[in-house]
């Protein structure tokens, strides 16, 4: 079974009274359970109905793994809110990343406590966000190269002052390619430069000799 399917199963077993609040199986009439080397197991499908010819079962050991995992997720979310001093009521959106988030039935997840009890309307599935994260990280690294270039080239002449902003899209300095536009600005506190901030945007057209600004025929 897939991960989201296991959460659906746990939620339905809980709603049916076949799992109690302590996370233990509660055998009832017309519910098929059996004893296995991994403890009591709920039988989803008998061997005559499965492709492998063996029973498809959800064991007490499987249930304990789900309980530990969902407890860790819920506790981590509450710990994060406590660390930043925000109550659950002030959370505007809860983003669920990954393909798992796309197929997860949030009602099932909330039923068994995978997440703190936020209103269902606050959840937003993002899909595969890891690819976007990797792209953002590469641009952030490019920004650090740009700042080093600014300090090296302009620290002495003409100098770097509060209110300065440096614009560039030179891939030989930091940009991934010409279409990446960077603006970097120093941050001052009590007259001392203490940090930098960088903003980057990707433009559709950057004025190159070909549409889109990226020319395969360009030469140096």
Image (cartoon, helix red, strand yellow):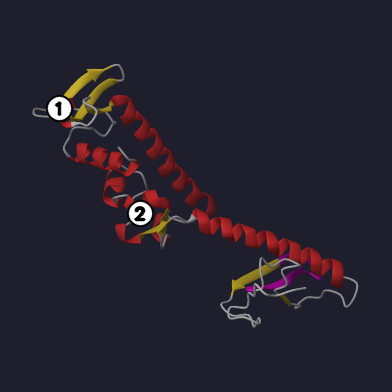
Q: Residue furthest right?
A: 156
- Is the residue under label 1 in contact with that under label 2 (CB below 8 Å)? no
Left or right placement of residue 85 versus residue 66 in this view: right
Magenta region: which residues? 179-196
Indicate the secondary structure of the residue bearing disc 1. helix
Q: Visible in this render: residue 194? A: no
Q: Please identify the quarter of the rendering in which residue 93 is found.
A: bottom left
Q: Closer to the N terminus: mark 2 or mark 1?
A: 1
Q: Could you tell me which residue is drawn at 69 percent across and 62 percent down?
A: 142
- Marking on residue 102: 2
Q: Could you tell me which residue is drawn at 34 percent across and 29 percent down?
A: 64
Q: Could you tell me which residue is drawn at 90 percent across and 76 percent down?
A: 157
Residue matched to label 1:
48
Q: Could you tell me which residue is drawn at 50 percent across and 49 percent down?
A: 80
Residue 193 coordinates in the image, percent (x, y): 79, 67
Which residue is at the front of the view, 192 or 217? 217
Left or right placement of residue 199 versus residue 4 in this view: right
- Residue 169, compared with residue 12, is above or below; it is below
Indicate the secondary structure of the residue bearing disc 2. helix
Residue 35 coordinates in the image, percent (x, y): 22, 18
């Amino acid at each position: 079974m897939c991960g989201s399917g296991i959460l659906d199963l746990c939620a339905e077993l809980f709603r049916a009274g076949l799992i109690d609040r302590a996370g233990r199986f509660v055998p009832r009439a017309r519910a098929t359970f059996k004893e296995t080397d991994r403890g009591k197991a709920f039988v989803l499908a008998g061997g005559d109905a499965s492709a492998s010819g063996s029973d498809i079962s959800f064991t007490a050991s499987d249930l304990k793994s789900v309980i530990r995992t969902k407890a860790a997720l819920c506790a981590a979310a509450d710990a994060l809110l406590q660390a930043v001093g925000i109550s659950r009521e002030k959370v505007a959106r809860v983003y669920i990343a990954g393909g798992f988030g796309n197929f997860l039935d949030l009602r099932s997840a909330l039923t068994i406590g995978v997440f703190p009890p936020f209103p269902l309307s606050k959840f937003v599935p993002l899909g595969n966000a890891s690819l976007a994260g990797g792209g953002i990280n590469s641009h952030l690294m490019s920004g650090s190269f740009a700042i080093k270039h600014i300090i090296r080239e302009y620290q002495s002449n003409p100098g770097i002052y509060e209110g300065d902003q440096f614009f560039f899209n030179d891939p030989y300095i930091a940009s991934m390619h010409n279409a990446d536009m960077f603006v970097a600005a120093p941050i001052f506190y009590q007259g001392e430069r203490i940090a930098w901030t960088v903003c980057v945007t990707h433009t559709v057209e950057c004025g190159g000799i070909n549409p889109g600004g990226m020319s395969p025929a360009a030469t140096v």
